[in-house]
Image: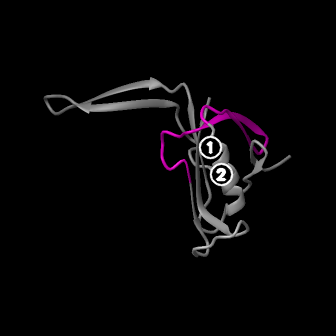
Amino acid sequence: MSGVFLDSIDITGLVIDEDFDVGISAVSEEAQDGSIIVYESDKLYRDITLIGGLDWGWLSKQTIQSVHSSAKTKGAIHTLDYDGDIFTVRFRTEDIPVINGEPIIKRSNQENTDWYNNITIKLMEV
C-alpha cells in the first residue's frame, strides 16, 4: 500500500523534512583563546520530521486530532509506514510543539472537516 501512515492514521501527503541527515551529532563551544572546539559523535537515533506546506500535505482537523491523541500517551511507540518503508518511532515530546498546523480558514469554531496546512509532526526513530 502506498502512502504515509502513523499507526493506522492516514497522513499521506506529508514528507520527511530531513531526508539527508548525516547521522552525526555535534556540540561546539568557544575555548578561552577564542577558537572553536567541536565534539562529534554518531547519532544512535534519527529525527523524523514530517511536514506539509502551504499548498500541499493538507490534513483535516479530525486527522490532526487523531495524531494529537496518539502523542499524548507517555512512552508510546508507534509505527510509521512511509510509502512502504517502516520505522519504529516515538513523538519528540521534548521538542515543543510536537504537532503543529495552521487552519486554511481561520475561525473560532473549526469543524472536524476543516483543512490545515503547514503541518509539522516531530518524531524520533527508536
Query: What residue is shown with label 1?
Result: 71
Percent x, y of residue 95: 48, 43
- Which residue is found at the position 53% from the left and 40% from the top? 93
Where 22 sits versus 54, above or below?
A: above
Disc 1: CA contacts within 10 A as few (<14), some (14-19) or many (>=20): many
Query: What residue is shown with label 2?
Result: 15
- Which residue is found at the position 54% from the left and 38% from the top? 21
Percent x, y of residue 94: 48, 39
Where 54 sits versus 69, above or below?
A: below
Percent x, y of residue 107: 58, 76
Q: Secondary structure at mark 2?
A: strand
- Which residue is found at the position 86% from the left and 46% from the top? 1
| Residue at far left of view | 33
In-front residue for pair 89/109: 109
Percent x, y of residue 100: 56, 56
Q: Is residue 77 visible?
A: yes
Q: Amino acid at mark 1?
A: Ala
- Which marked residue is nearer to the observer: mark 2 or mark 1? 1
Tell me where the magenta segment starts and ends, as one range: 74-99
In-front residue for pair 59/36: 59
Mark 2 or mark 1: name the one nearer the start of the chain: 2
User: Any mark on residue 103, and which?
Assistant: none
Give the CA distance from mark 2 to mark 1: 19 Å
Q: Quadrant of residue 51?
A: bottom right
Where 46 sits versus 114, above or below?
A: above
In-front residue for pair 49/23: 49
